[in-house]
Image: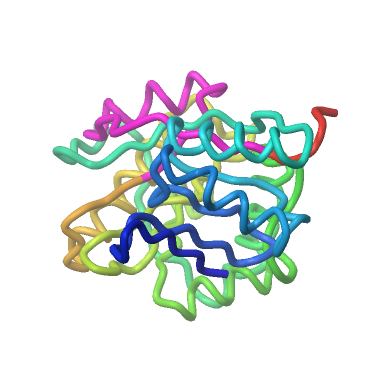
Amino acid sequence: MLLSVHHNGVLAAAALCTPPRDLIVSGLPADCAAAAVEVLASTHPQLPRAAGPRREAEAFAQSWAEGTGAVHERVAQRVFALHQLTPPVGVPGAALPAGASDLELLARWRQDFADEATGGLRGHGTALQQMKRSLAAGAAAMLWEVGGKSVAWASVSAPVIGMSRIGPVYTPPQYRGHGYGSAVTAAAASWAQQSCAKHVVLSTDLANPISNAVYPRIGFRPVHDAAEIAFTPAP
């Protein structure tokens, strides 16, 4: 679903939703939120969530709540962009791109990440189907290996209009605290740069102090805070 808002015949805003994913309101300024809600409340009353920079997301959610009911903030996020890549030093192991033989492991870790970070897998299909689609679209899945054993994973999208996005990044609990997540994220960023990405971005959950501290150390800088707001009463 693509909604555009016009003012005096000039395009003023746009919002995009690919069900069952969130409504993306990054291109919907706060002063256009009410006009968008007026349409979407009737055409898409079961809209699950909105996500975007905090100001835009909150403005849309406020208008939505006034017309349709309860909302609550589900995730507070921070968006980072790579400034100067500084890979960590002294981390044992090396990065390798995942192959077809790693799909079962990647699918298991994708499910584990979703269960821990978002309360379950989102989007269409199983974790295995999602990994296959991601790799078929040109994304890379970087694995950090120590002594021949995979200990961390970071996915990174192929550049689109010069931008690559890193995520998910996952280290199983038994391997945390050794710098593997930082190292594999740096490897994913390096892959994006070598693939001609001019911008490399990622987002973090503000409730996770570790990731918000780790990424600046390898060269990422905060761009803005964002929010994911659900259109249901808080559990």
Front-most of 118 and 190? 118
The quadrant the C terminus occupies is top right
Residues shaded magenta: 202-229
Residue in the picture at 67% in, 74% down: 129
Q: Quadrant of residue 85?
A: top left
Q: Is residue 209 magenta?
A: yes
Q: Image height check: is 212 above or below 87?
A: above
Front-most of 113 and 10? 10
172 to the left or right of 166 = right
69 to the left or right of 205 = right
Q: Image height check: is 120 above or below 161?
A: above
Residue in the picture at 28% in, 27% down: 216
Q: Image height check: is 135 above or below 74?
A: below
Q: Is residue 54 magenta?
A: no
Front-most of 158 and 102? 158
- Furthest-front residue in this view: 8
Front-most of 125 and 173? 125
Rendered location of residue 123, percent (x, y) = 67, 62
Rendered location of residue 110, percent (x, y) = 64, 55
The quadrant the N terminus occupies is bottom right
Rendered location of residue 217, percent (x, y) = 27, 26
Residue in the picture at 34% in, 31% down: 224
- Furthest-right residue in this view: 235
228 to the left or right of 25 = right
23 to the left or right of 104 = left
Rendered location of residue 151, percent (x, y) = 53, 45
Residue in the picture at 60% in, 49% down: 37
